[in-house]
Image (spheres, grey):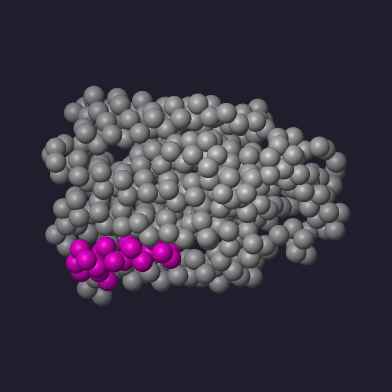
Amino acid sequence: MSEVALRARRRIAYRLLPFVFLVYVVNYIDRVNVSFANLRMSADLGFNDKVYGLGVGMFYVTYVLFEIPGAVIVERWSARKWIARIMISWGIVTALTGFIHSAGQFYTARFVLGIAESSFFPGMIVYLTHWFCSLDRSRAIACLYAAVPAASLIGSPVAGWLLGVRWLQLAGWRWLFILEGIPAIVLGVITLFYMTDRPEQARWLPAEEREWLVSKLQQELQAKKQIRNYTIAEAFSDRRILQLIAAWFLALTGSLGTIYWIPTFVKRLSGSSDRWVTTLLVIPALVGIAGMLINGWHSDKTRERRWHTAVPLFTAGLMFGLLMVVRHNVPLAILFLLLGSGFLYAYYPTFWAIPTLVLSESAAAATFGLINSVGQLGGFAGSYGIGFLNNRTGSLAASFCFIAIVYWLSGSLMLGLRVEQPESR
């Protein structure tokens, strides 16, 4: 590879990936802070597990509505403006959630937050495809997704501290929402000035590096079109895309259910204090960051995606299967719960590198939105399903079994997928 290409890849990574990572950290902290708030919120407001699970799931009912059009807007209009709009609106809604007093208000806040955040993630994936060639794409997505466990790494101790305060006669869980909504608003304004929509507009990129990147991305685009130039309708009916949708839905049913319930799981298994629970949740975050970066790097090096996606799913499923058996042995149960939650993260970047091997332009953007919108319904199925099982059985065992099964099914679907790596000509 030429010196110009190496300089361009390095400059783009240093310019874009830290900011994209930071934005997604703030996004995920705001999305899942309700899981930490629930250590006190449900008791204060008189919610049972079913009410909490339904409230969490309401976010995903509206989140799916604008996934596809939002991703297409990023492709055809402006990632910079659309992502800034999303961040400012979700920051405002998150802060206002700190003032709820009833189940109805909780449902409404989560419902509106879903509208505000919708299309953020597929929009970011589309944005990365505008800047990173296939050789670097899995690592770029890994850097984006590393924000998910990093959000837990940052959010857990902050939540542990805020849950113990009481300022201006407001409980700590209320301040958790209020204070964590502010960074999104600030970053939304910064996004308007910092992000650049496409390489052709990048004045910070030297001309020869800009020309190399534009040419490289165009070569890859033409290579995919030579295999098949999909329309949006054709992409939506492709068997491989439907298989990816099913696998993503099942994986998110388990992972999002776990994310929203893991503080409660740890507290009920261990009987520990809120501060100790939030401290323990740093462990899956550290495991997740290492797993994503290593798996994404190795996947790019070997140019293999299916096994790099399926193995983390099978491993996480195994941990939750074992957890169901040893749940009365507290140290082992906590260990399997934390490891299972951490190992799972490794599949994210390699999964999202797969649709880019098949599709391009508007078809790819719309398909990112379709996969994520249907998959995010797993957030409703998982969070509500776990709450229902907990209430119905009076035990966590059924929930652990449910999570293990959906991970194994998702991993099996990924192994059955057939995709080829298109080479630029």
Q: Is residue 136 left or right of residue 103?
A: right
Range of residues picked out in magenta:
99-117
> Residue 201 location, x and y as percent?
75, 64
Q: Is residue 242 left or right of residue 403?
A: right
Q: Is residue 128 left or right of residue 166?
A: right
Question: Nearest the camera: 347 or 371?
Answer: 371
For the point 20% across and 45% down, the residue is 388
For the point 83% across and 58% down, the residue is 206
> Residue 383 location, x and y as percent?
29, 47
Residue 224, placed above or below residue 101: above
Q: Residue furthest bottom?
A: 168
> Residue 349 location, x and y as percent?
55, 40
The answer to which quarter of the image holds residue 238 is top right
Query: Can residue 104 be seen?
Result: yes
> Residue 392 location, x and y as percent?
14, 41
Q: Main secondary structure of the magenta part?
A: helix
**Magenta segment: does it hold 78?**
no
Looking at the rendered image, the quarter that the C terminus falls into is top right
The answer to which quarter of the image holds residue 353 is top right
Looking at the rendered image, the quarter that the N terminus falls into is top right
For the point 63% across and 65% down, the residue is 78
For the point 20% across and 63% down, the residue is 103
Question: Nearest the camera: 5 or 104?
Answer: 104
**Magenta segment: does it hold 111?**
yes
Residue 335, placed above or below residue 102: above
Query: Can residue 271 be seen?
Result: no
Question: Nearest the camera: 44 or 100?
Answer: 100
Question: Nearest the camera: 227 or 393?
Answer: 227
